[in-house]
Amino acid sequence: MSRYSNDLIQFDIENKSLLNRDFILITLSSFVFFFNFHSFLLLPIRIQELGGSTSTIGFIMGATGLSTIFTTPAVGVLVDRWGKKRFLATGGLIMSLTTLPFAYLDTLNFLFPLLRIIQGGAFSLCFISAGALIADVTPVLRRSQALGLFGVFTIVNYALAPYIGKLIIETYSFKVFFLIFFIFGFLSFLVALLIREPDRRIKVEIEGSSILTTLFRKGVFVSAFTLMIAGSGFISTLTFFPVFAKDIKVESFHLFFIAYTLSALFVRLFGGWIPDRFGKKRAVVPSLLFFSLSVIWVSFASRASDFIETGVLFGLSHGLLYPSVYALVIDLSPIVDRGKAFAICSVAFTLGGMLGSFIYGVVADFFGFQVMYIAAGVVCFIGFIVFSVFGRDRE
């Protein structure tokens, strides 16, 4: 058993500013990575162009989540044992190399799901390493704020990558689109090499837990379940939104992504202190409620202004919900299990997204997008009830 507490193993981190050199480099590397990764929100349009159905879109897009389910626990263990920087850099390199082949694929074949599976592994490497590094290089009393600010530069790509990608595709072609985003994956790799990872030698005397022990620690399992439910609504909403917009003959789907991004940015920049000040559970409960309502609201969208309104509520609620639950899981886990804690969060969220993509894709095929979004919102509302009753803050 460790004789160190989380607070005793903060080294000199408490004396650092929030926006220190390594925080900036980690955030920049992740920003470039996710600029590439979120450009694949436009892949459903390409799949549809090549003759794929809604179920096919769900299968190919969900393949990324499927691989993440298997790779993330391993990554969580590896980064706790071997350090984080090297895995962050590797994730950027893999994402870059798997983007390039899409430029030359003109028919739907096994390479589409295969490449998306590999990209899921790249996501695990980048997200777990970057998130655990952020926790390592920022003060514990500003952890929710740090994770929220870090997430801002991930979130912005939900609007930036599809918007710029859409312009590239309309001006040039999907081939040029994939070639340009291939370059950004490589830039993520280069930036990661500049990061200085905190000294890990003090951890030699500390015994870490298994990933299952970490999962079933008090409060962690309910938080992970909440993330899984939220992920099912979040990923499915974003995955099918471009196709949904075309289905209701409103082409400006990017307005939803922009409204979502700006709202999430706003709440994280100006409200990121709320979970640290008032408690994570108090931040999660109302956020999850309004997130559920925003997903249901999507089903009633019929014009561009509806996209903006739903995007605002979707962004405000998710923008506070996501970092609050992550920070809560970190608070409930010892420092040597941070990689595993991030892995649990990521697996839970991605598992929900994967199941959502598969299941809701089939629902949309049989019953239409309106029923699909209502069903996704109702499931998220059930998650709100469960967390309200069983969720807990750190004592």
Image: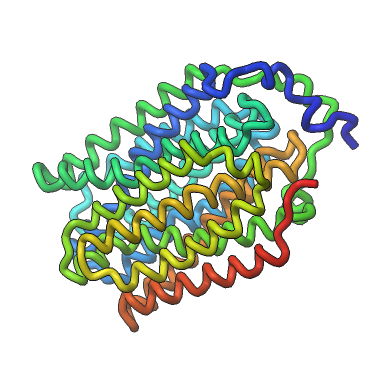
The image shows residue 100 at horizontal and vertical percentages of: 28, 40
The reply, left or right, for residue 214 in relation to residue 227 is right
Name, please, the residue furthest toward the left.
171
Residue furthest bottom as drawn? 366
Image spot of residue 333 (x, y percent): 74, 43
Coloring applied to the structure: rainbow
Depth order, front residue of 226/255 = 255
Q: Quadrant of residue 163?
A: top left
Q: Where residue 395 appears, x then y in whole percent?
A: 80, 46
Is residue 138 visible to the viewer in this orientation of the structure?
A: yes
Report whether residue 108 is seen.
no
Q: Between residue 67 and residue 166, name the one nearer to us.
A: 166
- Give whichever of 141, 120 is nearer the camera: 141
Q: Quadrant of the N terminus?
A: top right
Q: Residue at x 70, y 32 (%)?
A: 81
Image point (47%, 22%), residue name = 25
Image height check: is 358 above or below 113?
below
Measured from the top left, where is residue 18 in percent x and y?
56, 24
- Residue 67 lies, with reference to residue 26, above or below; the image says below
Q: Is residue 390 left or right of residue 236?
A: right
Residue at screen point 61% across, 46% down: 326
Q: Is residue 61 above or below residue 169?
A: below
Count of marks placed on residues: 0
Task: Answer left or right for 376 relative to 305.
Answer: right
Residue at figure coordinates x 35%, y 41% from the top left:
157
